[in-house]
Image (cartoon, coloured by chain):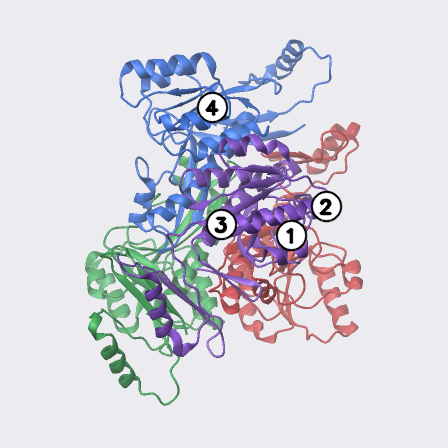
Chain colours: A purple, B red, C green, D blue
Amino acid sequence: MNADQHSTDPENGVFFMRVEFLVEDGVDRDKFALEFFEATKRFNPQWSLYDKSQIMRMGILVSKPGHCLVDLLYLWRSGELRVEIPFVASNYEAHRQLVEQFKVPFYFIPADKSDRKEAELLQLASRSTDFLVLARYMQVLSNDFLNSYGKDIINIHHGFLPSFKGPSPYRQALDKGVKIIGATAHFVTGNLDEGPIISQAVVQITHRDSLDGLVRKGKNLEKHALSDAVFSYVDRRIIRFADKTIVF
Amino acid sequence: MNADQHSTDPENGVFFMRVEFLVEDGVDRDKFALEFFEATKRFNPQWSLYDKSQIMRMGILVSKPGHCLVDLLYLWRSGELRVEIPFVASNYEAHRQLVEQFKVPFYFIPADKSDRKEAELLQLASRSTDFLVLARYMQVLSNDFLNSYGKDIINIHHGFLPSFKGPSPYRQALDKGVKIIGATAHFVTGNLDEGPIISQAVVQITHRDSLDGLVRKGKNLEKHALSDAVFSYVDRRIIRFADKTIVF
Amino acid sequence: MNADQHSTDPENGVFFMRVEFLVEDGVDRDKFALEFFEATKRFNPQWSLYDKSQIMRMGILVSKPGHCLVDLLYLWRSGELRVEIPFVASNYEAHRQLVEQFKVPFYFIPADKSDRKEAELLQLASRSTDFLVLARYMQVLSNDFLNSYGKDIINIHHGFLPSFKGPSPYRQALDKGVKIIGATAHFVTGNLDEGPIISQAVVQITHRDSLDGLVRKGKNLEKHALSDAVFSYVDRRIIRFADKTIVF
Amino acid sequence: MNADQHSTDPENGVFFMRVEFLVEDGVDRDKFALEFFEATKRFNPQWSLYDKSQIMRMGILVSKPGHCLVDLLYLWRSGELRVEIPFVASNYEAHRQLVEQFKVPFYFIPADKSDRKEAELLQLASRSTDFLVLARYMQVLSNDFLNSYGKDIINIHHGFLPSFKGPSPYRQALDKGVKIIGATAHFVTGNLDEGPIISQAVVQITHRDSLDGLVRKGKNLEKHALSDAVFSYVDRRIIRFADKTIVF
């Protein structure tokens, strides 16, 4: 059993709380929920109750770089990441073999921005997933898609946000001459690379690191930040609030 | 004896080299310089020769936060940082006592932006220093000052550049909800918080860190990044090139 | 108001809780304590109640390296570290000037291991301090001293414990060829460098770093880890339990 | 073209140098080697000349935890890690499917310590590999094996060496109450977990991290440190010297 609280500020702030219950066998879940609701009623809280034994369904979208994809697939297959993966969709056909080796359905969705393609993806995602992970997916999802899907989408950005938004963040970092690079996992919103940050990872670089060197070092950061974020999400340890996240 | 090389790219790039010589007693330095120049002539390099026994003169400008100031003063006093400190100038009179305890001259320069005040500071800096350190100096130096002074100026910015330029970077970081904060030491140019980066330091934060918590953690980063940069500078290990630095 | 809980394990573990209360003016503290005690009685907890407005008294012991000393003194003087400092005691007379500049009493206690010297130190510490900080104090305190003093003592060890106990940890790290060095703040117990760890800080090194380089980089780590530990202690965020610490 | 030098100490130390040459088409390699040898003869150096176009053959040994294995296999398959992988051998039959998906030969070598089994492994490794990687291989290789194989073996240890040698380093770290955990890639020698360190990676933990949490965080460190070490090795950037490594 764990419990965490956080309040944004002591006087007129918002108070957050996350409690894990160990429920004995034979306890009726609906009844438990009802009693919990009664007990907290006088504070009139916003609340959600999750059953940890229910497995979430995670759809994966990915473009050419496959390192985050294979990291997630292996975490899932080894039993560490407790999700279902109903599909991997990619605009890069070459991932098919890898994905099908893991016995996960693969959908090739070419990167023409036709409405039809996005509609297909939307239908697929809506009916079979509880959340999506963009594991280095380089296509921008339309606002229509985001609104219609309506559930959480986690993206890995290969830069230390809010620096280096948009394309080629390692190139931007190299040109700027920073001495530390980073990767950022965040929720997707309608504003590109602007959604609430979940986790970040960083590593030192020097003038000796070429663009290839940054990319190589960065891939470790991306795997690290993305898997951290996905674990936190699946464990229900993330609360989104006011463009930010509380990660218990 | 140490030697370092770096080339920006193998084909048409620029080649950098730094060599430390141990010179035996009795060697004439001017003669040595001449011979070195002859030996390298056929490559027609740009070069500089420094005598490590010559101590550089470092002027310090500081506003209210004094943690970087006292860090530098103690590094100097303990003999680790081999510089002269001809003065500390501040728009914050309360530092006088601390600075004079270290037997360093203190100048109070109020923060009215009159030309006369900056002219005083310029005269002071020009005649008595080889470089300046802005150890959390919150006044912007005019382009006239930068041009007339003409030597290197190292600034510590309390944010992870290029993110969070300008005032209140910790407030900006808190509002953005980042999970890692940083500090950046860089050379000053006419563009605020845009000059070549010398060193950066970072630390993890969580939603539990208040603004005060960020400021507290950040002070360690600022001391760390600034003293790293000053040591590298005094050791002549920094080469400025094309808006970036090579730090050997 | 903040609240933190932690339980060592869900079934037969120990449950820890720390709650900060904002008490309105006019509330009688003793009455509050009594009511709190009544409310928690049925769990029969071990508990302590601290009044945050009461300032703790921190004695400092230090040998030759003064960087942690000056860091603490400045944190105190700038008002960030809310303690009283009844004295600094050292076996290194040369710190007197620095300490007295900060208007803190200085005691020179030579490093002969006579019982008389330790008795003096014990008397001084016992009557005027709530806890002691060994800010790079290279003398080993006897078990008699520890038992008679009976309050908490925080030490900074300039190595990444449990590696590199005892003298010359940077030399040990260099000889071992590690690629990352660290510093460790911990409570002092009768076993040298074995007490509960409070905080650790690390930095990357390379084969280029000489012993002097390690010492220089390490000093930043030591200041960082020790001030973190002291802030946590003064904020009453540390719970010692079973040779380990919980730092809320 | 790159060049790096390092000398252990300026007076009677050893001087190391690594130079990458870009050789024009049509240059005879043997002639080039001869000329290079002539040019350096008067210093009587120990030297090796490698042809970067020659791909090294890397054998992998692995026990149950497969995260480093899959990381290496994917780095190889994506073309980033330029090696041949003649085989993966494991005492854990369940890896067969994964390995064969990558079209790499898999050998099941049960963990009975019979001489016959080790002899098989030795024969396999000797005839088909230039170096071995122990990607979480929990069997100890005998001194006979090490001597007969005679080439480099890189191991990943899931602890921050020299702390926490031997089995269950995360359990050891948890029991000790450290605040930072690490992983270490090193060359294998006859002394368990004592060989020259190549790379280390670390991450902060808190009292909230259970053993499972440490293991989860640690896996990222292990992948990170091991792939760094393997890249450095394959790029011929590592020089072993006196129980330590120089990594250019």
Element class at badge 1: strand
Give the class, few, some or many, for how many residues have Cα within 10 Å of label 1's Cα (few <14, many ≥20): some
* Rendered location of residue C211, percent (x, y): 46, 41
Residue D241 makes an appearance in the image: no
Give the residue type at disc 3: Val
Give the residue number, with chain letter if any, for mark 4.
D100
Q: How far apart are marks 2 and 1 (CA)?
A: 60 Å
How packed mark 2 is, by other alpha carbons closer than 10 Å (few <14, some 14-19, many 20 or more), is few
Label ID, residue A230: 3
Task: Name the front one of labels 1 and 4.
Answer: 4
Q: Residue at x 59, y 26 (%)?
A: D18
Other residues around mark 3 within 10 Å, as few (<14) / some (14–19) / many (≥20):
many
Relative to the observer, which residue lies in front, B138 or C33? C33
Q: Quadrant of residue C92?
A: bottom left
Q: Do the residues labelled 4 and 3 touch (CB within 8 Å)?
A: no
Farthest-out residue, bottom: C26
> What element does badge 2 sit on?
loop
Distance from label 3 to label 1 (Cα)? 52 Å
Badge 4: chain ID? D
Q: What element carries label 4?
A: helix
